[in-house]
Every structure is written in C-alpha cells, then in structure tokens.
Amino acid sequence: MIASTASPSHRRLCLLGVGNGNDVDLEVLANHFDEICLVDLDEASLRQCVDGLSVTAANRTKMRGRVDLSCVLSQLDSLHGNVAVPGQTLDDLVSMARDLPPKIDLGRWDVVVSTCLLSQLIDSVFIAVGPTHPRSTELALAVRDGHLAQLEAVVCEGGKTLLITDFVSSDTLPQLRDVASDSLQSLVHQAVANRNFFTGLNPAVLLQQMRKGQVSVKAYPAWRWVLGPRCFAVCAVETASGGLITG
C-alpha cells in the first residue's frame, strides 16, 4: 500500500510512528523512494528498524528519534490518572495537542504516512488522565485532530498522506479473529454502526475529517492485523492534493 503512493514526482517518504519497523518493509520501500525518513519517540526501536538493511536501503533511510508526535506525552506522564487535574492544565494540553503542527519541524515530504500511531497517541491520553475523567475524550480528540493536522503540515504541496490506524479489536469484537474474509467488511461496518470502535477512531469520521481542504480522498477496505492474542481491524485513508487519487 505505501509503495503504491510512490511516483516519479513522489520520491521522498516520511513514516510517522514506525517503531521497530515490523509492519513495513524498508527494503521494498527503498526500491520505490529515493529518501525515507523514520520518525518515532523510541530511538532504540528506530535503530532496530534499520539494522540489517542492505547498503542501498540504509543509504536512503534516515532516522528522527526522540520525537514526541503528540507534543504532550511528557505532560501526560505527570498526571497519573489524577481526576483532580486543574482545568487550566487540561485547557493547556488541549491547546498544545490541537496546535501541534508548528511545534514540530519535520520538513516537507512527498508522501507522509502515519503507521498505526494514532491509536497509541489516543491511548496515552486515557492511560494518563483515566478513561472516566470528564475531559478525557476532549483531550483524546484534540490529540487526534492535531495529528491529522500534522500530516497536512508535513506533506509537500501536491503530495500524498496516508493514515493507517487500527480502530477496533477482538476485545470488544471477538468475531473479528474468525470471521470469513468475504464477511469482514460487513462485520466491521456493523461494529461501527453499533459504536464499537476506539474513541476518536470511527473510520467514517476520520474520512470526513481528512476530506477538509482541497484534497481528494480514498478510503481502503478494512483488513485484519493479528498481534499476539489480539486481533485488530485496520483502516487506511489516503489523501492527495491537487489531483485525483487513482488506484
């Protein structure tokens, strides 16, 4: 999917939240892109990501570690689920999350991909503030909106963004693991209709949010991602400015 975004005019790729690279094949991507930037908070995972790459792939890949792509993680770590967090503190965090793009300079790239990062960013809010806090959802949505704005801020004019995110798991949708492939779309559509999805990650809302502005949008069919004992449904939304998305 990521490789398909490359073209003669789209040869520079930025991967956000790539971690140790288990979900991407950098060797394949290096055949399609001249320059690849890996961005993540965990610098050690990025080093693991590039270990063993061929000389060609290694020469085309650079790392940006210790980058907090939510811009609020350090502040969240200090909250520890405190229900008495002052309102001004949460106001500040909401503003920081929503005003994210100017705070992190990643340059501009032809293709910018968020690789199952958004659910982790949102989950960090609920871990820190607590799922029952009256403003936890507000902050989670601010983190989401800031991340979507960040994709737009990092992509070049005429470039493409690709948001890939898990949106429901077998914890609340146990049929997900065993459902037949030809019934998967029906299952996840029904789950979304029943509001069975991670907070802030309704695929229809993500699609609507990413339609804002003068871009063309393409939604990919959901697919399964098995991670240990859990199974996730994953969706992807691709945007392209200045022209129609094909394929």
Image: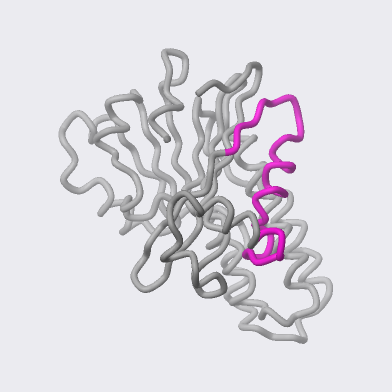
Q: Which residue is farthest top? A: 8
Q: How many marks?
A: 0
User: Which residue shows up at 64% across the image and 35% down it?
Assistant: 152
* 57 to the left or right of 174: left
Tell me where residue 226 appears, x and y as whole percent.
37, 62
- 179 and 142: which one is in front? 179
Q: Is residue 119 above or below residue 98?
A: below
User: Which residue shows up at 56% across the image and 60% down it?
Assistant: 119
* 144 to the left or right of 65: right
Quarter of the figure with residue 32? top left
Quarter of the figure with residue 28? top left
- 179 and 65: which one is in front? 179
Tell me where residue 211 appears, x and y as whole percent.
72, 35
Quarter of the figure with residue 237? top right
Q: Is residue 46 above or below residue 2?
A: below
Which region of the structure is painted magenta?
192-219
* 195 to the left or right of 5: right
User: Which residue shows up at 71% across the image and 65% down it?
Assistant: 194
Q: Is residue 214 above or below residue 41?
A: above
User: Which residue shows up at 68% across the image and 50% down it?
Assistant: 146
